[in-house]
Image (cartoon, grey):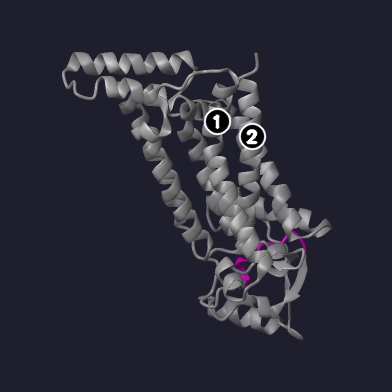
Amino acid sequence: MKQFLQKKAKLVFLCMLVLLTCTACANPRGRDGKTLADQIIASEETTIDASKINYKDISDKKLKKEIKKNIKDGKYTIQPTTFKNSMSHGWFDGLIVWPIAQIINLVSAKTDAGVGIIVTTLLIQMLVFVFTRKSQMSTQRMQEIQPEIQRIQDKYKDKTDERSKMQMAQEMQNIYQKYDIHPFGSMLVTFIQLPIMMGMYYATMRAVSVVSGSFIGISLFGTPIEGIKALNIPCIIIYVLMVIFYIVSMKLPQWLKKWQDKKDNVKVKKYAQEETNPMANSMNMSMYFMTAMICIMYISWPMAMSFYWLVSSVIRVCQSLILHQVMNKK
């Protein structure tokens, strides 16, 4: 087990490196919260209301002067953003942010910004699922077999000799093999999803369709906290639904396991009961902590991100239901 963990150390380091690279991108917003004019991504020549952009905080004085000169009658025309131009700002901009923003723009051109985000999210989730299907199944099984893992850990918790440690590792490995679980499978999902989530964050702030558009009358460029202050009911509903569906997507595998056990008349042993299972309690605490973090981050991020996370959570709920049916198919 120790050697196995050592082999995975490089993967952990790579994940951290990707996260640091993603978060190192420049903030595309000015001090007033509006997107900087030179950061907006467009798929075609687009004229928008100049009040929705910021040019005063652009560091390049020559560019700032040029943008100000091109604002006429309160309107500013944005030229198409090329792949080459995006790559000049770095690989993350060119390979992740630019494609996501362009998909949002292309779909929004035929509908609106909200539908653009929904379609883009569906495409992203389908792509992620294709590459991480086995890993996601392992992750779901991992959640379902936590009581058995806890039983093994309790069995050896007071034994510190090497022989007992090896026996515990072997029993754990047998459980993983029995259910065809790869313990680090969830890491692959995280490794792929982190850059995409950060890419979506930047894309929703920079896509011209989101900056200037809306969804059923709701501005997706504002933040939930602004909506709460203004008592904007649709904004509040989207934010609350995002939190609810995120919790449901996290808890659903455990609920499905309980439902399946009840359906199959499986007697739940004492160590498997959630109220007496320290690992289950620990997982719940982690979930509540993650939910709190999501709430804090997303309340000050563009409304488009809350909408994206809501759609993603609904898709994950559907995936959990489908995976449960596949794994329990007789």
Q: Between residue 291 and residue 219, name the one nearer to us.
A: 291
> Residue 319 got which mark?
2
Name which residue lies at 25% across and 20% down. Answer: 156
Name which residue lies at 59% across and 31% down. Answer: 131
Q: Between residue 223 and residue 32, name the one nearer to us.
A: 223
**Whole-percent x, y for residue 145 in the image:** 45, 24
Q: Amino acid at mark 2?
A: Gln
Q: Amino acid at mark 1?
A: Gln
Q: Main secondary structure of the magenta part?
A: loop
Q: Is residue 330 above or below residue 139?
A: above
Asked whether 120 falls inside the magenta stretch, the response is no
Q: Quadrant of residue 256?
A: top right
Name which residue lies at 45% across and 51% down. Answer: 21
Q: Of discs 2 and 1, which sits in the foreground?
A: 2
**Whole-percent x, y for residue 195 in the image:** 52, 47
Tags 2 and 1 in contact by the CB under 8 Å rule? yes
Q: Which residue is mark 1?
A: 136
Q: Residue furthest left?
A: 161
Q: Which residues are magenta?
A: 37-44
Q: Quadrant of residue 18?
A: top left
Q: Is residue 82 above or below residue 123?
A: below
